[in-house]
């Protein structure tokens, strides 16, 4: 139900509770427990960022190993950054960035490129967008 039926409304968990014949607090407590024990990482919506006017890109950074943690933390402070992760290889820190426009994207990437320890940056813009819908069959 979380994957397919969570509505965009003021109290989506009350909506789920009604469908499950329980109360909102029970649903919230169960979700907190599932997150605490590691079954859930996050609950959130996906929007069509292009229709909202946003631009996105995948960025690969080559970061001096001594600065990797500090750079990753600095990058994470930008609200449009998602999927920030370390990789093996020459370019060892990768993340996606969603920005409200190209100018904001350029400014953020310029700031990130100037962080101590950042040696190189690749901006890997997608030429075509693929939407992957993942639904897990849980029984």
Image (spheres, helix red, strand yellow):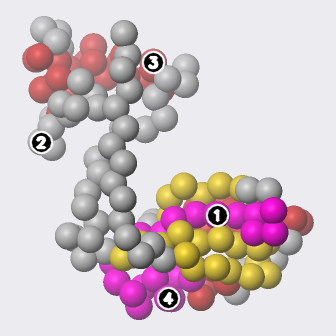
Please give left or right for residue 15 compared with residue 83 in the image. left
Residue 33: numbered disc: 3
| Residue beneath disc 4 | 106
Rounded to the nearest angstrom, the CA distance separating label 4 from label 1 is 17 Å
Give SS at disc 3: helix
Rounded to the nearest angstrom, the CA distance separating label 3 from label 1 is 31 Å
Residue at 37% x, 16% y: name it.
Answer: 138
| Residue beneath disc 1 | 94
Query: In this view of the protein, can residue 116 be seen by the observer?
Result: no
Residue 78 percent across, percent down from the top left: 51, 69
Relative depth, front residue between 34 and 119? 119
Rounded to the nearest angstrom, the CA distance separating label 1 from label 2 is 34 Å
Residue 71 percent across, percent down from the top left: 72, 68
Q: Residues within 10 Å of mark 3 (few under 14, many from 20)?
A: few
Q: Which residues are magenta?
A: 89-109
Earlier residue among tags 2 and 3: 2
Looking at the image, is mark 4 or mark 1 nearer the viewer? 1
Residue 9 percent across, percent down from the top left: 12, 42
Earlier residue among tags 3 and 1: 3
| Residue beneath disc 2 | 9
Give SS at disc 2: loop
Q: Residues within 10 Å of mark 2 (few under 14, many from 20)?
A: few
């Amino acid at each position: 139900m979380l994957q397919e039926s969570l509505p965009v409304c003021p109290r989506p968990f009350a909506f789920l509770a009604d469908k499950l014949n329980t109360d909102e607090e029970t649903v919230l407590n169960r979700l907190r427990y599932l997150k605490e024990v590691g079954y859930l990482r996050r609950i959130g919506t996906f929007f069509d960022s292009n229709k909202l006017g946003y631009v996105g890109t995948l960025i690969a950074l080559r970061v001096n190993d001594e600065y990797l943690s500090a750079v990753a933390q600095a990058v994470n402070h930008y609200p449009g950054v998602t999927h920030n992760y370390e990789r093996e290889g020459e370019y060892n820190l990768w993340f996606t960035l969603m920005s409200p426009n190209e100018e904001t994207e350029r400014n953020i990437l310029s700031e990130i490129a100037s962080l101590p320890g950042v040696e190189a940056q690749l901006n890997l813009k997608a030429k075509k967008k693929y939407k992957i819908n993942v639904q897990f069959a849980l029984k």
